[in-house]
């Protein structure tokens, strides 16, 4: 869990050029962190690569809103 | 009385300097921007030299988060546009944003991005291609980003005519203001094509000089020993403004854009029409549009690429338009120093022409050593020359047979 969160924070902070401390579990990617649709896709693709998973297009990946949603999703995917 | 169009802002990023003033000083000193390629390992390439931008730092112009979503060509275009905008004083001025547009051309757009993302596709598969790939690739993104950053809501698109892209952007922008469609246009060209794919491609065409052992001597327009152009990169952007609009806000006026001529060779993909017929018609149209006669012109900033055919046919074209007066003209190619900035060339060379008019000095054609019987005009060899010039042309020609000439006049108030 801590490991997944750490990597998610790192990827989002790097992609959005923000402080990793801003990337809290409650933070919404679009509303709180200011990502646009392309940046959302960019973050997701980077996390796929980082964790060696693949989110297919019908997947719930498109509905991920907060950092907590992303962490939960990744944990389910990597089992 | 028709509307007049003046240049109120100029910004340049060139292999000779990261701003207009440094570049201009270097041009007058005859400095050279060509060197061994450092961007990538070129040891397997037949051509290993280029005129690279040196030490460009994007961060003073664009926040890092935005910059990483832009191809270098767009970063250069935006940086030069921001410098031009600041120079114009419009950053603190009042204007109608719906009557202010942006037209920035590029020859090849985001070719570095294309190259990188194609490798990603091949090595990692389609799922890894960046969501920013398309916006970084497309050649109109400098125009798009400049409009976003400056809030300009008038006409917004790009011109693509290979090495004439920047000149056409200025030409159509000039027309847009003169006919009343706009009061302000940000116009010019941006290019960032020093990358393996484009160097390999231009080398395959035998278009670029293979003078790897003497990079500073490789770009030698009009010299008998010329053997191709030198690939350069950068951006040149001007702010064009309707004269009364500029006067009302007390703007500094650098020069007046007086005429624009554009033609097509209808001849060959890459070779100019024999005798430079298309180029000659473009110059004649620019003069006519500016209500000038050949004898009014003192200086031509030539396309002068340093390829065997261009320089021969451009010379022939000048002679056919100017007749006896061709002998009295000063003709120089600043590409001897900057290299060939492709789609940005027309932008930076319009700036150099405006500066020549404003400062009464003509930058030289450097590396001019051995006269060529086919190139027998006054090329301002090797030394800048003080000369009062009232009217000038700047020429740009592109693969595809695109010819563009812009007439620029000294602004006397």
Image: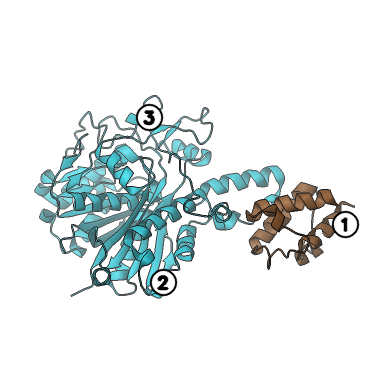
Q: What colour has chain A? A: brown
Taking the image as shown, residue B54 lies to the left or right of residue B9, namely right
| Marks 3 and 2, how far apart at CA | 43 Å
State whether discs 1 and 2 lie on one chain.
no
Question: What is the secondary structure assignment of the residue under circle 3?
Answer: helix
Residue B253 in the image: above or below residue B192: below
Q: Locate residue B376, reporting x and y percent.
A: 17, 37
Q: Residue at x 41, y 70 (%)?
A: B155
Give the quadrant of the C terminus of chain B.
Answer: bottom left
* Between discs 3 and 2, the one toward the N terminus: 2
Q: Work out whether residue B188 or residue B306 is closer to the camera in this orientation and state it.
A: B188
Q: Nearer the viewer, mark 3 or mark 2?
A: 2
Residue A68 in the image: above or below residue B47: below
Residue B183 in the image: above or below residue B116: below
In the image, which disc is placed on residue B215? 3
Residue B91 in the image: above or below residue B139: below
**Total numbered labels:** 3
Tag 1 subunit: A
Residue bearing the label numbered 1: A76
State whether discs 3 and 1 lie on one chain.
no
Question: What is the secondary structure assignment of the residue under circle 2?
Answer: loop
Taking the image as shown, residue A40 lies to the left or right of residue B392, namely right
Question: What is the secondary structure assignment of the residue under circle 1?
Answer: helix
Q: Work out whether residue B277 or residue B213 is closer to the camera in this orientation and state it.
A: B213
| Marks 1 and 2, how far apart at CA | 49 Å
Residue bearing the label numbered 2: B154
In the image, which disc is placed on residue B122? none
Q: Work out whether residue B403 or residue B70 is closer to the camera in this orientation and state it.
A: B70
Tag 2 subunit: B
Q: Nearer the viewer, mark 1 or mark 2?
A: 1
């Amino acid at each position: 869990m801590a490991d997944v969160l750490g990597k998610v924070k790192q990827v989002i902070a790097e992609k959005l050029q923000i402080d990793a401390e801003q990337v809290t579990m409650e933070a919404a990617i679009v509303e709180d962190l200011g990502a646009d649709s392309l940046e959302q896709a960019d973050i997701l693709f980077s996390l796929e690569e980082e964790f060696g998973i693949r989110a297919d297009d019908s997947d719930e990946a498109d509905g991920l809103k907060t950092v907590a949603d992303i962490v939960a999703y990744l944990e389910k995917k990597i089992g | 009385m028709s509307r007049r169009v003046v240049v109120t802002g100029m910004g340049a990023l060139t292999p000779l300097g990261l701003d207009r003033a440094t570049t201009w000083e270097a041009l007058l000193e005859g400095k050279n921007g060509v060197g061994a390629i450092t961007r990538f390992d070129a040891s397997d390439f037949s051509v290993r030299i280029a005129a690279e931008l040196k030490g460009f730092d994007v961060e003073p112009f664009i926040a890092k988060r935005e910059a990483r979503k832009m191809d270098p060509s767009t970063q250069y275009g935006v940086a030069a546009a921001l410098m031009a905008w600041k120079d114009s004083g419009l950053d603190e001025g009042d204007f109608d944003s719906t009557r202010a547009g942006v037209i920035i051309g590029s020859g090849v757009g985001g070719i570095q991005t294309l190259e990188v993302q194609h490798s990603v596709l091949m090595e990692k598969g389609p799922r890894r291609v960046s969501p920013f790939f398309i916006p970084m690739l497309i050649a109109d993104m400098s125009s798009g980003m400049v409009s976003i950053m400056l809030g300009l809501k008038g006409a917004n698109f790009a011109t693509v005519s290979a090495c004439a892209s920047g000149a056409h952007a200025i030409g159509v922008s000039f027309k847009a203001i003169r006919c009343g469609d706009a009061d302000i246009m940000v116009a010019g060209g941006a290019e960032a094509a020093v990358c393996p794919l484009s160097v390999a491609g231009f080398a395959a065409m035998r278009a670029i000089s293979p003078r790897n052992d003497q990079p500073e001597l490789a770009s030698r327009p009009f010299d008998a020993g010329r053997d191709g152009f030198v690939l350069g990169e950068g951006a040149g952007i001007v702010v064009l403004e309707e004269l009364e609009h500029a006067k009302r806000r007390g703007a500094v006026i650098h020069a007046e854009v007086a005429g624009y001529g554009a033609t097509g060779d209808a001849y060959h993909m890459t070779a100019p029409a024999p005798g430079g017929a298309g180029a000659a018609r473009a110059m004649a149209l620019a003069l006519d549009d500016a209500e000038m006669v050949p004898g009014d012109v003192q200086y031509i900033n030539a396309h002068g690429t340093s390829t065997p055919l261009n320089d021969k046919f451009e010379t022939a074209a000048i002679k056919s338009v100017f007749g006896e007066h061709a002998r009295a003209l000063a003709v120089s190619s600043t590409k001897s120093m900057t290299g060939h900035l492709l789609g940005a060339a027309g932008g930076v060379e319009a700036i150099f022409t405006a500066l020549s008019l404003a400062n009464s000095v003509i930058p030289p054609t450097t590396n001019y050593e051995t006269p060529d019987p086919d190139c027998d005009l006054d090329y301002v060899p090797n030394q800048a020359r003080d000369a009062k010039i009232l009217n000038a042309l700047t020429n740009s020609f592109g693969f595809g047979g695109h010819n563009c000439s812009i007439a620029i006049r000294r602004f006397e108030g």
